[in-house]
Image: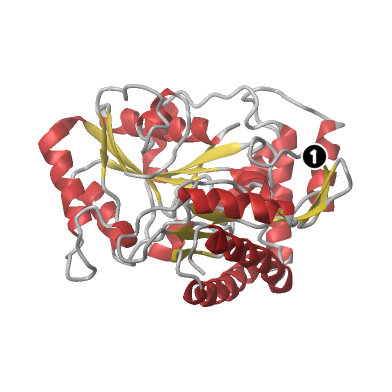
Amino acid sequence: MVAMHPVAFESGKGVVLRDVDGNEYIDFSSGIVVTNLGHAHPQIAAAIAKHAGELENVHDFATPVKVEAMEALATVTPPGMTLFTFFCAGTEAVEGAMRVARAKTGREGFVSFFGDYHGRTGGAAGVTGGGASNGLRPPGSLIVPSGHCYRCSFGLTYPQCDLRCAHFAEEAIQQNQGENVAGVVMEIIRNGAGATTYQSDYVPAVAEICRRNEIMFIADEVASGFGRTGAWFASNHYGVVPDVMAIGKGLANGFPVTAIAVREEHAEALAASFPSTSYGGNPMACGAIVATINVMREEGLIEHCHDLGEFALARMRELQERHPIVGEVRGKGALLAIELVKDRQTREPFPEAGNLVYQTAFRNGLAWATAGHILRITPPIVMTPEVFARGLEIIESAIDEAEREFGYV
């Protein structure tokens, strides 16, 4: 990102960032989907400062605020997911969830999906799609096509496809790994690959495959949780309750803490997974978690983000109609994306246009994340529709420039 648009940020307030030269930017990234409540929220800052002045770290020992954070989490996680362990990074949480699955099943292998991103350490990279693993995957890692209809790996159309992608995943489990599969790891709504959402029956079908084959369903909600999609968790949209869920990013509005939430019936497996952390459950982090949950309730941010998403998608669909290089707009809440293509019929990705749009919009006052031909739009969930519309106008102006540059107008 720095190479494509060199900038050094100095401060932020709400949904606006300021660089060292005094330029201001609308924040369409939220750091990297972490500052859900915007920058320098006074209640979050006060909670962190309070605990920094009292007690910073006592390893895995209990503290009053850690108990308070766990009790608060239990009120928002899916039913029965009331056991928690804290970590620092999303990749740690994913690997922690994988350890629970191994402890529960006595197996080693995992199945995951094309395009999903789970982290950059060994186990998490092993279940990450694409080239992010930076080498050979661990034995037992099996990656299969996802249920992304716009880019169906089977060339089929929903609903006539009868969810071929889900059936294939089960066949792959049974043919390739048999009794060695510990679990399925899945981003319920993708972040890195650009806000991919699924048909309403696809995620429940994957969860049922796990139940039927007696393996653990692990939901990676590091990016999609804590109101980001207009619900507390993306799994809420699909009516599923995972066995283990990795959460983070917006969990404490950007303070470095993540967690796994585990169903009560897996308590022994959680204990057997050696859930220890040096920094994850420190009082500052737990104070930020409690403050984040309180703010989200006090300000009605779940409902606000849902409504913002409805507004945003309507505007994005209008933009799609006006621009031939826009292949698909998608997402939920404030986890959104615009996919650019060279031709709508072939759907060939258009990364050159994506890079140009990214740089042009950044120069014009929009701070956001790069993703090649996929324009990722992840503003703080506190953003108003009016400010979102201004950000989208900057993007559309940049798309206009790209279409002129590449001969589409």
Position of 71 with respect to 218 (left or right) is right
Secondary structure category for the residue under label 1:
helix
Counting every numbered tag in the picture gives 1
Q: Quadrant of residue 271?
A: top left
Q: Quadrant of residue 15?
A: bottom right
Residue depicted at x 62% and y 22%: 278
Residue depicted at x 71% and y 69%: 390
Q: Residues within 10 Å of mark 1 (few under 14, many from 20)?
A: many
Position of 325 with respect to 23 (left or right) is left
Camera-nearest residue between 405 and 342: 405
User: Can residue 29 be seen at all in this image of the molecule?
Assistant: no
Above-or-below relation of 32 to 123: below
Amino acid type for the residue under numbered disc 1: Ile
- Residue 144 in the image: x percent, y percent? 25, 43
- Residue 209 in the image: x percent, y percent? 22, 51
Position of 392 with respect to 108 (left or right) is right
Above-or-below relation of 236 to 69: below
Residue depicted at x 29% and y 65%: 201
User: Can residue 115 be seen at all in this image of the molecule?
Assistant: yes
- Residue 118 in the image: x percent, y percent? 44, 38
- Residue 1 in the image: x percent, y percent? 63, 39
Q: Which residue is mark 1?
A: 48
Above-or-below relation of 217 to 53: below
Visual colour scheme:
secondary structure
